[in-house]
């Protein structure tokens, strides 16, 4: 299947109207794109015994959570507050069934309270977390996150499996942690691993099959097991908006893994997947305005470049600055204008506030229609880890988020932050 193109981002008249009403920068969500991606995932899990979750850290907005819930998608939360956000969006408390799973490396802030008060399933990633639960008097079911020793993030910093990953218990230690949990009165009802969303589909199939085989080796000793999670890992193509999604092949991989693991266990096991990025990445774009165009000159230190200065910065979309991540950039109102290599840079007092760089953190001019002051520019595929990772650095307020429906209606669901919002937490 193919994901519908992001409709509002290609409508320059609409974008100018929204810019006049809400200012720039702003986020625009396409509800049709989001629903198409949700349906794509759900269609891979329509077999008996397969359940989809949403890794809500990608975008925890209530509007997004309600779309997930209406489609029958459960939640993977990573903090106490994410648990509470999911509860306020209508997800059920308790762990039978475990609509909310709390995956954490450390019980910080109110994370333990979320387990005790809301009854959600804790997914523990270290022996110390089992000890923390025991100290808190918890004797309910747990999930155990293992590090299978391999994985592939979209960049090295995002590898979620292997010797350099902090996540999970090394798979050879899983039984030792299970024994400690059982001694403390807890049953391990789920095994979990996440191998990253970096690989292309062919590598993903191989990794998922490998992961299922690794789980099959240890499942026989987990007598209370009810489910196994293969994590997320469905890739999103940031460079090709028209990329095909092999939904049928994914369904086959998930069904095969569920049957294999159930056979090894000698009983029916629930197989879970928990994409985050794949659901939401193409559903939101960041719209910004070009405020100036200026040049530097070549000298002994390097080549000169043309900077297109925009009013969005890494406070709005940090992935390019943090990871060197690629986001498509378009100028929807420009037709027939010649292209030229430009570096797109933001307003922050940081040299790293640049949207066009490679994964080695070097500037990478992008061939774009030669921008002019006043042009609107669209940064695509920002629905995952865009607004979710926004900040108030330089005391900049976070941009508003707008919601577009196929009938053409647009409503704000997150307003622009003000200085009063930023100062509200300060005392004295």
Image (tube, grey):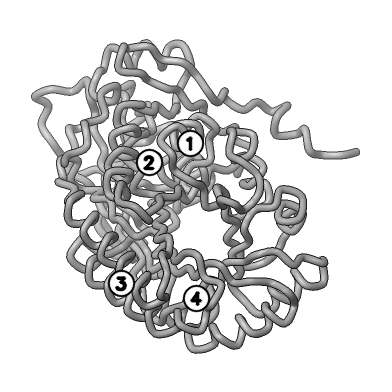
Say what secondary structure mark 4 lies in: strand
Query: Residue 235: x percent and y percent?
Result: 28, 55
Q: Which mark is residue 348?
A: none
Dot 4 alpha-carbon crowd within 10 angstroms: few under 14, some 14 to 19, many 20 or more: many
- Mark 3 to mark 2 CA distance (whole Å): 30 Å
Front position in the image: 404 or 304? 404
Say what secondary structure mark 2 lies in: helix
Query: Eyeballing the image, is 104 above or below 134?
Result: above
Front position in the image: 17 or 47? 47
| Residue at the spot of label 3 | 260
Dot placed on the residue nearer the N-terminal end, 4 or 2? 4
Dot 1 alpha-carbon crowd within 10 angstroms: few under 14, some 14 to 19, many 20 or more: some
| Residue at the spot of label 4 | 146
Determine the image quadrant of residue 217.
bottom left
* Residue at point 40%, 52% (across, down): 51
Residue 336 as seen in the image, left or right of residue 139: left
| Residue at the spot of label 2 | 280
Query: Residue 161: x percent and y percent?
Result: 42, 74
* Residue at point 41%, 62% (across, down): 231
């Amino acid at each position: 299947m193919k994901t519908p193109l992001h409709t509002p981002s290609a409508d320059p008249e609409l974008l100018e109207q929204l810019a006049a009403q809400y200012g720039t920068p702003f986020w625009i969500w396409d509800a049709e794109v989001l629903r198409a991606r949700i349906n794509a995932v759900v269609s891979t899990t329509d077999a008996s015994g397969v359940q989809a979750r949403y890794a809500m850290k990608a975008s925890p907005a209530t509007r997004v959570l309600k779309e997930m819930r209406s489609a029958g998608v459960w939640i993977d939360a990573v903090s106490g507050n994410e648990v509470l956000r999911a509860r306020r969006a209508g997800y059920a408390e308790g762990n039978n069934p475990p609509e909310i799973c709390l995956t954490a490396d450390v019980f910080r802030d109110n994370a333990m309270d979320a387990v005790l008060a809301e009854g959600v399933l804790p997914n523990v990633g270290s022996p110390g977390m089992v000890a923390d639960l025991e100290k808190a008097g918890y004797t309910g079911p747990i999930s155990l996150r293992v590090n299978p020793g391999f994985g592939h993030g979209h960049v090295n910093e995002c590898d979620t499996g292997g010797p350099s990953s902090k996540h999970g218990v090394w798979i050879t230690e899983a039984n030792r942690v299970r024994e400690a949990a059982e001694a403390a009165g807890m049953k391990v009802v789920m095994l979990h691993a996440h191998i990253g969303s970096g690989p292309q589909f062919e590598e993903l199939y191989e990794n998922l099959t490998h992961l299922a085989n690794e789980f099959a080796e240890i499942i026989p000793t987990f007598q209370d097991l009810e489910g196994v999670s293969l994590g997320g890992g469905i890739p999103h193509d940031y460079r090709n908006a028209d990329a095909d999604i092999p939904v049928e092949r994914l369904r086959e991989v998930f069904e095969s893994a569920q049957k294999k693991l159930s056979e090894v266990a000698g009983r029916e096991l629930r197989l879970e997947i928990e994409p985050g990025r794949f659901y939401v990445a193409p559903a939101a774009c960041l719209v910004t305005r070009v405020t100036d165009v200026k040049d530097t000159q070549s000298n002994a230190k390097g080549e000169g470049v043309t900077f297109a200065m925009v009013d969005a910065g890494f406070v709005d979309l940090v992935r390019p600055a943090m990871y060197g991540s690629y986001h498509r950039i378009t100028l929807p109102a420009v037709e027939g204008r010649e292209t030229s290599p430009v570096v797109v840079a933001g307003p922050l007092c940081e040299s790293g506030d640049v949207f066009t760089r490679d994964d080695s953190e070097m500037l990478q001019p992008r061939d774009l229609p030669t921008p002019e002051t006043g042009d609107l520019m669209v940064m695509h595929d920002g629905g995952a880890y865009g607004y979710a990772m926004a900040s108030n650095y330089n005391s900049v307020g976070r941009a508003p988020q707008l919601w577009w429906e196929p009938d053409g209606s647009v409503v704000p669901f997150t307003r622009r932050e003000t200085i009063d919002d930023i100062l509200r937490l300060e005392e004295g």
